Image (tube, helix red, strand yellow):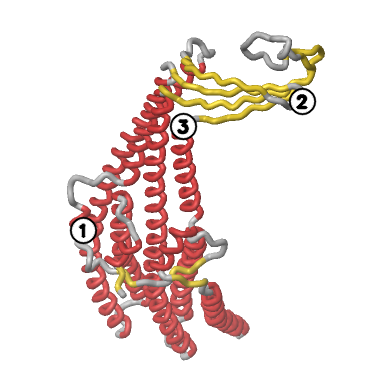
Amino acid sequence: MRRNTQHKRVIISLLLLNIIFPSLLIAQATAADIPFQEISLNDALTEALKFNPQAGAAAMRLRQAEAGVRAAKSSLLPDLVTIGDYTRNEEPVLVYPMHGTPTPADPLEFEKSIYSGIIRLDVPILDLSGLSGIGAARRTVDAQRARNTVIQQGIIAGVIEIFIQMGQISDNLTLIDSHIKALERRETELKTLAQEGRVSPAHVAEAGASLNSTISDRLELLHRKKELGYRLGGLLGRKQPVYPRKHTFSLSAISGKDLTDEPFPAGPKTLAAEAGYAAAQAGKDAAQFSFAPRVDGFASQSLRSGPEIDFSSEWSLGLTVTLPIFTGGERLARLGAAEASAEAARHERDSAFINDRSEASILRSRWENTAVRRTYLSDAVQNQLLSVTATESRYKEGRSSLSDLLTEETTLLELRMRERSLLYEQLLSYTAYYQIAGKLSPSFVRTFIEE
């Protein structure tokens, strides 16, 4: 008798645990599902392109490159400078060392304090290195513009991918929540039957285990949902998470024909690498022209005075020819560095070209493979649904076990989640392909968002 009493206490404890524990988990899941500040996809794209830190840094690097062009051009413009100085000598020196012959009326003057000034105009006449420098600076601007396009495409792709992942998580949550409700109903029914002695406590425990496992999966999805909020906030340039609003995605307006067109267009990464190679080549040319002679014209006016501040002046005009003969190997070192930079840029260009085309081919194959897999999984879902219906009917008739039914229902849930995930995998492949091609824009998302 005592053993029976203890056995009943254990059964009651298990029943209470199965009632309380799932309720706590559901409450925890509900508490964890606290919505962040929501934003639509279009608004997120607009804000990200405007406030993303990488976009801001890229804009400043472009301004820096454009300033480099102005600096290079200024080296070919005339320079007008003035120089003034005051000198205190130990012995008196000649105040006016000008041309002419001293006379009794205009003798030579000597003073210890001398004031002098020069106004000089330098005009470049032949500067091949400076001309090449302008070309290199312009090529650098082109390369930076191309890099900015790569960054812009990456920002747009990042935002779109977050919203696509959010759509997948929302779909999975809908399926899981429906499954949880079904399991809760079944568990409640089994608890009632257990109290009447019509089923064993093991059946209740089995249903509870399946419910708890599904709730655990739901908590994982909620965690991933929170991660997306932080990632989206970072892309928007915010310090707090931003919750991506749920959108309905569809492939009905996408034929996929543009993914199979040949040849693949040169994308922003290839163009950026090509522009970088052109800039490196221009830098190499500028380094080679640094060995060429430089011709400058000049005009200057020299002024000199003693303590009386009575300046006397003279003009001078001339040409200056500068021919570097030996500068300690500086120019040779610069040329070697420029040649190495040009060769490295050539390899980077070839690598970008190969990688873009390889990645495009992979994405094409993934798109086609996923489309076929979706067809088979769609059929598998329908067949599994029939299997669940048949198993549930046999279970009600007592010809099938609860374990079999739970297994069939879990398989159906997994198949549905996999079938929906392939839709989002196709969307991600589609977005990645357009990112490589450099065709992403805020209007791009209209092709697969259902209003």
Using the numbered discs, state the Cα–Cα distance from disc 3 to disc 1 in whole angstroms: 55 Å
Q: Are marks 2 and 3 in contact (CB under 8 Å)?
A: no
Q: Which residue is mark 1?
A: 256
Q: Earlier in the sequence, mark 2 or mark 3?
A: 3
Q: Nearer the viewer, residue 150 or 377?
A: 150
250 vs 338, left or right, is left
| On screen, residue 138 above or below 360 | above
Q: Nearer the viewer, residue 315 or 427?
A: 315
Q: Earlier in the sequence, mark 2 or mark 1?
A: 1
SS of the residue under disc 3: loop
Indicate the quadrant where residue 406 lies: bottom left
- Of discs 2 and 1, which sits in the foreground? 2
Indicate the quadrant where residue 6 lies: bottom right
Furthest toward the bottom, the residue is: 196
Q: Which residue is mark 3?
A: 77
Using the numbered discs, state the Cα–Cα distance from disc 2 to disc 3 in whole angstroms: 37 Å
Q: Nearer the viewer, residue 58 or 25?
A: 58
| On screen, residue 378 above or below 66 | below
Using the numbered discs, state the Cα–Cα distance from disc 2 to disc 1 in whole angstroms: 89 Å
131 vs 378, left or right, is right
Q: Which residue is mark 2?
A: 308
SS of the residue under disc 1: loop
Tell me if mark 1 has few (under 14), some (14-19) or many (20+) residues whose alpha carbon lies within 10 angstroms of its own: some
**In the image, residue 407 lies at what x, y percent?**
35, 71
Q: Residue at x 32, y 81 (%)?
A: 395
Tell me if mark 2 has few (under 14), some (14-19) or many (20+) residues whose alpha carbon lies within 10 angstroms of its own: few
Q: Identify the amino acid type marked 1.
A: Gly
Q: Are marks 2 and 1 in contact (CB under 8 Å)?
A: no
Q: Residue at x 38, y 60 (%)?
A: 161
Q: Nearer the viewer, residue 252 or 153?
A: 153
**In the image, residue 324 lies at what x, y percent?**
48, 13
Q: Residue at x 52, y 23 (%)?
A: 299
